[in-house]
Image (cartoon, rainbow, N blue to C red):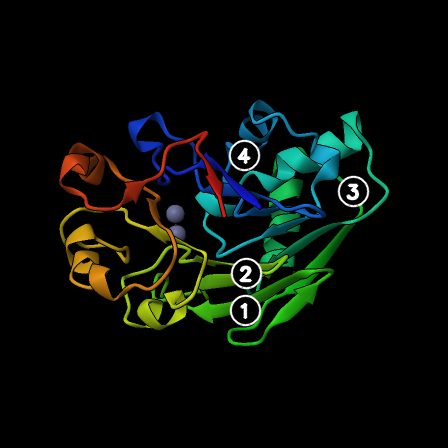
């Protein structure tokens, strides 16, 4: 199984990086973890046909994590129609926000425009959802005060990926990372600062307790990028392909 890093930047495009998106390529499945605004061009640059996409799993409903979905919708409406529904799974409010965003961006002025065939799946914290061979165990993470943000533990073809979503560092990540094949952990900052995000200095105090096979830091801001030579972990790059 491979994971293609389509976007490892933050909301601000720091370092010229794309917004959050990771493509999981399994033998039988092709799915995204998050879908920031820059995802469709990055997906095409990686050489994939959008019609092959089975599902988009969303950690939370900030624009740099779901703002790219309307571009996939217009791809399926105007360029490459699909018959099998695209599955979109995310926290409470996902269906309403995705539909509303599409209407704002590409809807008609008087009538709502139909979206392509889509099946929405609501993810509940600590309840495993099974989507045709993809097992998702979402868990709540501290990131937004007015909405639910999730981290995702995803199992597929015998492999496990732990994705932090956007979150403050929390001890639960240490437990959840135990035995994971890949821990994709956001690291927006190097030192502690305001904003509900991981900073490297805090994460570093737990580095030797993480028992995952691979740790990759992502969702990188300018300050952490400027100090990357002080980081004792793999730092993501757009276009990087990880063997899991
Ligand atoms: Zn973000
Ligand atoms: Zn966020």
Is any atom of residue 103 visible in this view?
yes
The label nearer to you, 4 versus 1, is 1
Vertical side of 48 occupied by 114: above or below:
below
The residue wearing badge 1 is 137
Please say if the residues under marks 1 and 2 sit with CB atoms less than 8 Å apart: yes
Mark 1 vs mark 3, CA separation in Å: 27 Å
Secondary structure of residue under mark 3: loop
Q: Earlier in the sequence, mark 4 or mark 3?
A: 4
Q: Assess mark 1: CB under 8 A from ligand 2?
A: no
Question: How many numbered dots are placed on residues in this image?
Answer: 4
Q: Nearer the viewer, residue 12 or 4?
A: 4
The label nearer to you, 3 versus 2, is 2
Q: Earlier in the sequence, mark 1 or mark 3?
A: 3
Mark 4 vs mark 1, CA separation in Å: 23 Å
The residue wearing badge 3 is 116
Q: Is residue 150 left or right of residue 104?
A: left
Mark 3 vs mark 2, CA separation in Å: 26 Å
Residue 171, percent from left and from top: 28, 71
Q: Earlier in the sequence, mark 1 or mark 2?
A: 1
**Image quadrant assignment for residue 81:** top right
Mark 1 vs mark 2, CA separation in Å: 6 Å
Q: Residue at x 52, y 47 (%)?
A: 34
The residue wearing badge 4 is 39
Q: Residue at x 56, y 38 (%)?
A: 68
Please say if the residues under marks 1 and 3 sit with CB atoms less than 8 Å apart: no
- Is the residue marked by circle 3 packed among few (<14), some (14-19), or many (20+) residues within 10 Å? some
Q: Residue at x 50, y 40 (%)?
A: 36
Residue 105, percent from left and from top: 61, 35
The label nearer to you, 4 versus 2, is 2
């Amino acid at each position: 199984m491979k994971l293609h890093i389509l976007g490892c930047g933050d909301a601000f495009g720091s370092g010229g990086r794309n917004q959050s998106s990771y493509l999981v390529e399994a033998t039988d499945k092709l799915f995204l973890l998050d879908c920031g605004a820059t995802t469709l061009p990055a997906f095409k640059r990686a050489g994939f046909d959008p019609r092959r996409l089975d599902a988009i799993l969303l950690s939370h409903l900030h624009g740099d994590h779901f703002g790219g979905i309307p571009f996939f919708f217009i791809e399926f409406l105007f360029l490459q129609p699909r018959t099998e529904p695209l599955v979109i799974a995310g926290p409470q409010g996902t269906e309403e926000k995705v539909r509303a965003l599409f209407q704002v961006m590409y809807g008609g002025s008087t009538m709502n425009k139909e979206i392509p065939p889509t099946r929405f799946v609501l993810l509940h914290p600590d309840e495993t959802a099974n989507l045709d061979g993809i097992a998702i165990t979402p868990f709540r993470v501290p990131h937004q005060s007015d909405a639910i943000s999730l981290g995702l533990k995803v199992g597929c073809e015998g492999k496990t990926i732990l994705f932090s979503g956007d979150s403050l560092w929390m001890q639960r990540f240490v437990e959840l990372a135990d035995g994971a094949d890949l821990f994709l952990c956001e690291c927006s900052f190097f030192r502690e600062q305001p904003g509900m995000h991981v900073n490297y200095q805090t994460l570093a105090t737990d580095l030797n307790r993480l028992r995952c096979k691979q740790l990759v830091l992502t969702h990188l801001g300018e300050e952490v990028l400027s100090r990357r030579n002080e980081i004792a972990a793999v730092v993501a790059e757009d276009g990087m392909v990880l063997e899991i």
